[in-house]
Image (spheres, grey):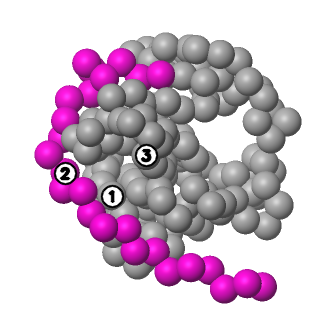
Amino acid sequence: MQTYLFKLATQPEEIAAYYALRRLIFVEEQQLFSGDDRDDIDQIAYPIVAIASNTQQVVGVVRIYPGESGLWYGGRLGTHPEYRKGWHIGKGLIYKAVTTANTWGCRQFLATVQLQNVRFFQRLHWEALQEISLYDRPHCLMQADLDFYPASGDPHPVLFFPTREAS
């Protein structure tokens, strides 16, 4: 059985693979963005990756970032198309994202979820708050039940991501 490591992306090759997989999913496959899906939030977000143990390939991504007064957000959750059998990767990424934020002082964790994934999140102890539209697609603002996501003990790293050069 395939196993995965869920971790903060800290090495340059992990961060490069994180952005490459996001581009594959959100730009090429879903066509939510043109050219690149990076935005200003990436300057404050912590990238989390799922790494396949047998190949060391980044096969899943999500980012977390702080708001104000203990509010945290998750976003850009995705799994490589060749690894979408079952929900193990998505479930692991969500767990890692919320437990990490909970460790760092999260009092509320929100995410905007594509409508087709709402039931999956509900099974993982998330509550649907409001249907919204993002990038001309239906989404749902959802909130994690933090009682099901205990603090993980991960240290809070200092962010340092090189800025992109203008093209």
For the question of whether residue 99 can be seen, the reply is no
Of circles 1 and 3, which is in front? 3
Tags 1 and 3 touching, CB below 8 Å: no
**Lateral position of residue 35 relative to residue 40, left or right:** right
Q: Which residues are magenta?
A: 143-167
Considering depth in this image, is 117 or 137 the residue closer to the camera?
Answer: 137
Callout 1 touching callout 2 (CB < 8 Å): yes
The mark closer to the camera, 3 or 2, is 3
Task: Tell me the amino acid under the disc marked 3.
Answer: Pro
| SS state under label 3 | strand
165 inside magenta stretch: yes
Amino acid of disc 2: Asp
Q: Is residue 129 visible?
A: yes
Tags 3 and 2 touching, CB below 8 Å: no
* Mark drawn on residue 8: 1
Q: Earlier in the sequence, mark 1 or mark 3?
A: 1
- Using the rendered view, name the quadrant where residue 99 is placed: top left
Residue at screen point 75% across, 57% down: 27
Classify mark 1: helix, strand or loop: strand
Task: From the image, tell me which residue sits under label 3.
Answer: 66
